[in-house]
Image (cartoon, rainbow, N blue to C red):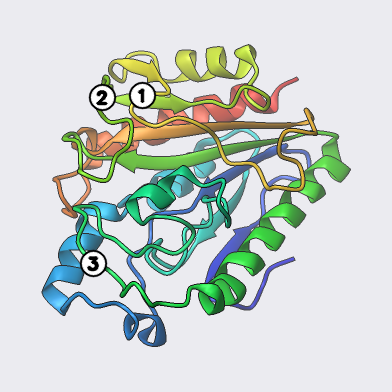
């Protein structure tokens, strides 16, 4: 089901793997046509990309996949979340609308204008958000058809210091935060993740970020779809904000993520 569009890429894994590593926020790419609708100048946009991008997470996921006994599938967003954020609800259910960060952002991480109040988000939703959601839905459906279950592991990162846009950023900021969903994240999956990341640093659940991504077709209705968000604090593997990756940190994270994938892949 590889889409020729450069906006996302679905990378094949083992036919027997239930795991989809989802990397939604690793890219800094903003197409020229989309850039025209952003009010920031080039320097300010570069700074915003430093703060908002989950830098190097696509590389961490790729390195982990190479280490797995059963290669997971990978779904990677090739565009910045400043184009559209594929993990937001596309309607009023999205709590991040309160800070201008729904499916299409209108405010920055620091509350500044990103797009004018009159901006019409619908063309971006139709061009980028809905095809991405449809392809991710299909990817999960393929795993269900092939092996009878699917496990989405979201690979994210977050800054060591709270940014103004964070709605729930006043709690702990552990080295690794596991985001869970009451319906799609069973206790066994959380236990597997805790064991996989043992020794990497302190581990927390749902602080400062909570929840896990599931395509809306399956969300809250199909328990065959498991989901977990892995949020890595950036100072453990890179220089903030937007700096280069640290080799030992990346390798340690890739090893831990591979351990999690291997555990999840075994029934």
Q: How far apart are marks 3 and 2 (CA)?
A: 27 Å
Q: Residues within 10 Å of mark 2 (few under 14, many from 20)?
A: many
Q: Which residue is drawn at 26% across and 19% down?
A: 172
Query: Disc number at residue 207?
Result: 1
| Residue 22 x/y as whole percent | 55, 47
Query: Disc number at residue 113?
Result: 3
Q: Which of marks 3 and 2 is in front?
A: 3
For residue 53, which quarter of the picture? Answer: bottom left
Q: How crowded is mark 1: few (under 14 residues within 10 Å), some or many (20 or more)?
A: many
Circle 3 — which element? loop
Q: Mark 2 points at which residue?
A: 173
* Residue 206 left/right relative to 247: right
Circle 2 — which element? loop
Q: Is residue 261 above or below residue 196?
A: below
| Nearest to the observer: residue 241 or residue 168 | 168
Q: Distance between the residues labelled 1 and 2?
A: 7 Å
Q: In which quarter of the image is the N terminus?
A: bottom right
Q: Nearer the viewer, mark 1 or mark 3?
A: 3
Q: Quadrant of the C terminus?
A: top right
Q: Residues within 10 Å of mark 3 (few under 14, many from 20)?
A: some
| Nearest to the observer: residue 118 or residue 224 | 118
Q: Contact, CB < 8 Å: mark 3 with mark 2?
A: no
Q: In this view, does 58 lie above or below 49?
A: above
| Nearest to the observer: residue 98 or residue 201 | 98
| Residue 112 x/y as whole percent | 19, 61
Q: Is residue 47 above or below residue 165?
A: below
Q: Is residue 267 above or below residue 230?
A: above
Q: Earlier in the sequence, mark 3 or mark 2?
A: 3
């Amino acid at each position: 089901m590889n889409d020729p569009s450069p906006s996302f890429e679905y990378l094949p894994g083992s036919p027997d793997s239930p795991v989809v590593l989802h990397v939604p926020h690793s890219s800094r790419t903003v197409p020229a046509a989309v850039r025209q609708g952003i009010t920031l100048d080039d320097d300010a946009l570069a700074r915003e990309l430093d703060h908002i991008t989950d830098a190097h997470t696509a590389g961490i996921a790729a390195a982990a996949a190479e280490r797995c006994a059963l290669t997971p599938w990978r779904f990677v967003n090739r565009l910045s979340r400043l184009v559209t954020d594929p993990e937001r609800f596309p309607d009023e259910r999205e709590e991040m609308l309160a800070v201008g960060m729904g499916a299409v952002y209108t405010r920055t991480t620091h509350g500044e204008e990103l797009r004018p109040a009159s901006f019409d988000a619908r063309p971006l939703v139709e061009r980028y958000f809905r095809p991405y959601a449809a392809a991710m839905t299909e990817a999960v459906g393929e795993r269900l058809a092939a092996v009878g279950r699917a496990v989405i592991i979201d690979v994210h990162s977050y800054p060591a210091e709270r940014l103004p846009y964070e709605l729930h950023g006043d709690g702990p900021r552990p080295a690794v935060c596991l985001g869970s969903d009451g319906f799609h994240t069973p206790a066994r999956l959380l236990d597997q993740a805790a064991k996989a990341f043992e020794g990497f640093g302190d581990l927390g659940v749902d602080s400062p970020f909570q929840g896990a991504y599931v395509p809306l077709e399956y969300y809250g209705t199909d328990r065959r779809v498991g989901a977990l968000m892995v949020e890595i604090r950036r100072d453990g593997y890179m220089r903030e904000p937007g700096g280069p990756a640290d080799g030992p940190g990346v390798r340690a994270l890739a090893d831990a993520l591979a351990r999690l994938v291997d555990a999840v892949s075994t029934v």
